[in-house]
Image: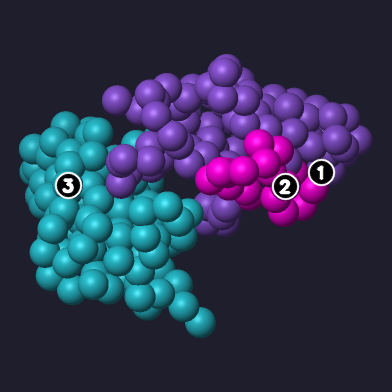
Chain colours: A cyan, B purple
Amino acid sequence: DGGITQSPKYLFRKEGQNVTLSCEQNLNHDAMYWYRQDPGQGLRLIYYSQIVNDFQKGDIAEGYSVSREKKESFPLTVTSAQKNPTAFYLCASSTRRSSPLHFGNGTRLTVT
Amino acid sequence: AQSVSQHNHHVILSEAASLELGCNYSYGGTVNLFWYVQYPGQHLQLLLKYFSGDPLVKGIKGFEAEFIKSKFSFNLRKPSVQWSDTAEYFCAVRGSSASKIIFGSGTRLSIRP
C-alpha cells in the first residue's frame, strides 16, 4: 500500500545536538511538506518542496533545515539553533498544487 | 499573507446534538479550503475540500461545510454528532497562487455519550 512513512515514532535527544527526522513516500507525489504541531497552535509550516532539489521556507523555518535530493524523500534536520525543538512533527505530500495533503503518522521529538 | 482562524478551541456536545465549527480565513484571492480531522492516536485525514463550484460541500461521515466568500468563512457542520466524532478538527487554506497550505489552530471536539 502507498503511503508516507515517518521514522522513528519517538525520538529523544540532548540539547545542543542536531537530529534528523526521516520522511519517505511511495505515492509518487511531487510536493512534500513539514509541519510542527503544538497543543493549541495547530499545524505550523516549517518547509515545503514542490520538486526535487528545490524547497521553500514556511512560517517557522528558523533552526531547521531540509534537503530534497530524491522525489520520495524529504528529511528534516532540527538544529541546535532551534530554541524550542520539543514537538510533534508531521510530514505530508500532495500530487500537485491544488490537491489535498496526505499525512504521515508523525515523529514526537523530545529534547532535554 | 494567508491565515486561518478557528475561534472555538474546545467544544463539548452531547450525542445527537448539532455541530458547527467556525473557520475564517484571510487571503485576497481565490482559495482552496479544507477540513482535516485527527482522531485520537491516528494521523490527520481529509474530511472534505472546496475548490470551486457549489459552495456547500459534503464530506465523509456526514460532515458538510459551506463556503461563504463574502464572510471569508468555511464552517464545518454535522446535524447529529456521535461519540465517535470525538477528535481534533483543523481548517486549512491554500491561496490559488500559493503552494503552501496554512492550518488553523484546531478545535477539539468532545462528545458526551
Question: On the image, numbered disc 1 is attached to which residue?
Answer: B83
Residue B8 occupies which quadrant of the picture?
Answer: top right
- Determine if marks 1 and 3 fall on one subunit: no
Instruction: State the CA–CA distance, disc 2 to disc 3.
Output: 33 Å
Q: For the residues marked 1 and 3, what is the alpha-carbon distance in whole angstroms?
A: 40 Å
Q: Identify the residue position indicated by label 3 in the image.
A: A56
Position of residue A43 in the picture relative to residue B15 (left or right): left
| Label located before the other in sequence (2 or 1) | 2
Residue B77 is situated, as x and y percent measured from the top left of the image, at 74, 34
Instruction: Estimate the x, y position of residue B100 in percent, counting from the top left.
Output: 32, 44
Q: Amino acid at mark 1?
A: Trp
Residue under mark 2: which chain is it in?
B
- In this rendering, the count of numbered labels is 3
Residue B2, how many percent across, how many down?
Answer: 35, 28
Question: Which residues lie in the magenta part?
Answer: B47-63
Q: Residue at x 40, y 68 (%)?
A: A4
